[in-house]
Amino acid sequence: MHEWGATAGTASLAVLAVHGRGQTPQFMQETAGRFAAAQVRFHAPHASGDSWYPEPFLAPLERNRPALDRSLEVVTGCLDELAGRGFPRDRVVLWGFSQGACLLAHHVLTVAPQRYGGLILFTGGCIGPKPVTAPPAGALDGLDTVVRSIDRDPWVPRYRVEQTAELLERAGASVDLRIDPGNEHVITDEACGAAGALLAAAG
């Protein structure tokens, strides 16, 4: 994992930062510079070929396997590695953009629905043509979540972002959802500010 931020010995919180399709951990590092986050150490895995799965995220799941399954395992492996470094799940904030946000949303809802230090989803939602089944009520109690997107984003439709936020809330997460007007695939300054506030509160 590519790492930056507070030193491992002084960080009160770890962030697992998952990049989007066609991006690298360096993009996440540049974006994190807009958070104004202190005492946080960021850890960013790098997808093979800069992509976590081959097809659009709304395609049938079978078309994105086995790459999707391997990528979900990467997330689990990163979390296990962070736990071994002294950051248990409740001291780790999951943060993803675009394809990375889709991967993390799917992981939290289907692989490991439990309390984390926080969840930040920028322009993403659960994977597949239909929404996944919500985890049991209470599975995500205490999970503070920031969800941000753009109304007419060219890759991620508004309805899937809203469906994902609803699934998280049903499982007990506290979701701060905002969808701004526009048609660009971007991360707004407001979104970065909300992420920074979540990290400050979690730390």
Image (spheres, rainbow, N blue to C red):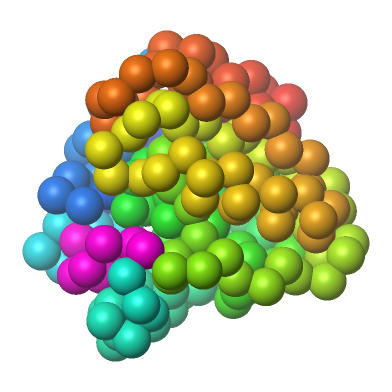
- Res 52 → quadrant: bottom left
| Screen quadrant of the N terminus | bottom left
- Res 58 → quadrant: bottom left
| Near-viewer residue (67 or 79) | 67
In the figure, is residue 28 to the left or right of 111?
A: left
Q: Can residue 7 be seen? A: no
Residue at horizontal 27 percent and vertical 31 percent from the top: 185
Figure check: 75 above or below 32: below
In the figure, is residue 111 to the left or right of 172?
A: left
In the figure, is residue 13 to the left or right of 102?
A: right
Magenta-span inclusion, residue 20? no
Residue 55 pos. (x, y %): 22, 68
- Res 153 → quadrant: top left
Residue 6 pos. (x, y %): 47, 31
Magenta-span inclusion, residue 52? yes
Residue at horizontal 59 percent and vertical 43 percent from the top: 162
Q: Residue furthest right?
A: 138
Residue at horizontal 28 percent and vertical 78 percent from the top: 64
Q: Residue furthest left?
A: 49
Residue at horizontal 80 percent and vertical 59 percent from the top: 171
Figure check: 111 above or below 166: below
| Screen quadrant of the C terminus | top right
Residue 154 pos. (x, y %): 26, 38
| Near-viewer residue (26 or 99) | 99
In the figure, is residue 74 to the left or right of 13?
A: left
Residue 42 pos. (x, y %): 43, 41
| Near-viewer residue (39 or 160) | 160
Q: Can residue 197 be seen? A: yes
Span colored in magenta = 51-58
